[in-house]
Amino acid sequence: MLYDENLKQVMLGILDDRVSGIACTINNLVDEGYLPNKKKLDILGWSTLLIHAYENIDIFSKEQQTNLDSIYNKVIKM
């Protein structure tokens, strides 16, 4: 089953923006001598994984797509 292409592009855009923002924040913290907290690193890791998953979402079954959407919603709320 094909995933809605428009929805896929919106989700990828949101994830790309989120990864860029968090990476910039982490970089700024390190430049100032601080260590980023675990939550920022977790969000960065999960968002990166989700980007790759959504780029290839058409190969997943409907159940896997639903589970991926559930993970996406949890990561966005972090």
Image: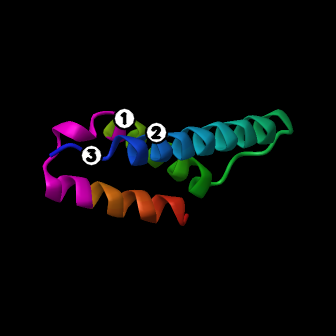
Q: Is 71 in front, or is 33?
A: 71
Across and down, in percent, residue 28 comes to: 80, 37
Give amino acid for label 3: Tyr
Q: Are marks 1 and 2 in contact (CB under 8 Å)?
A: yes
Q: Quadrant of residue 68?
A: bottom left
Q: Quadrant of residue 70?
A: bottom left
Give amino acid for label 2: Thr
Q: CA distance from mark 1 to mark 2?
A: 7 Å
Across and down, in percent, residue 35 comes to: 72, 45
Q: Quadrant of residue 25?
A: top right
Residue in view at x 17 percent, y 37 percent: 59
Across and down, in percent, residue 31 comes to: 82, 33
Up-down: is 7 above or below 75? Answer: above
Question: Which is nearer the N-term, disc 2 or disc 3?
Answer: 3
- Residue linked to disc 3: 3
Q: Residues within 10 Å of mark 2 (few under 14, many from 20)?
A: some
Q: Is 49 in front, or is 70?
A: 70
Q: Is residue 62 on the magenta stretch?
A: yes
16 sits to left or right of 11:
right
Q: CA distance from mark 3 to mark 1?
A: 15 Å
Checking the image for residue 52, the label placed there is 1
69 sits to left or right of 73:
left
- Residue linked to disc 2: 48
Q: Residues within 10 Å of mark 1 (few under 14, many from 20)?
A: few
Q: Secondary structure at mark 2?
A: helix
Q: Are marks 3 and 1 in contact (CB under 8 Å)?
A: no
Residue in view at x 35 percent, y 40 percent: 5
| Stretch of the chain drawn in magenta | 54-66
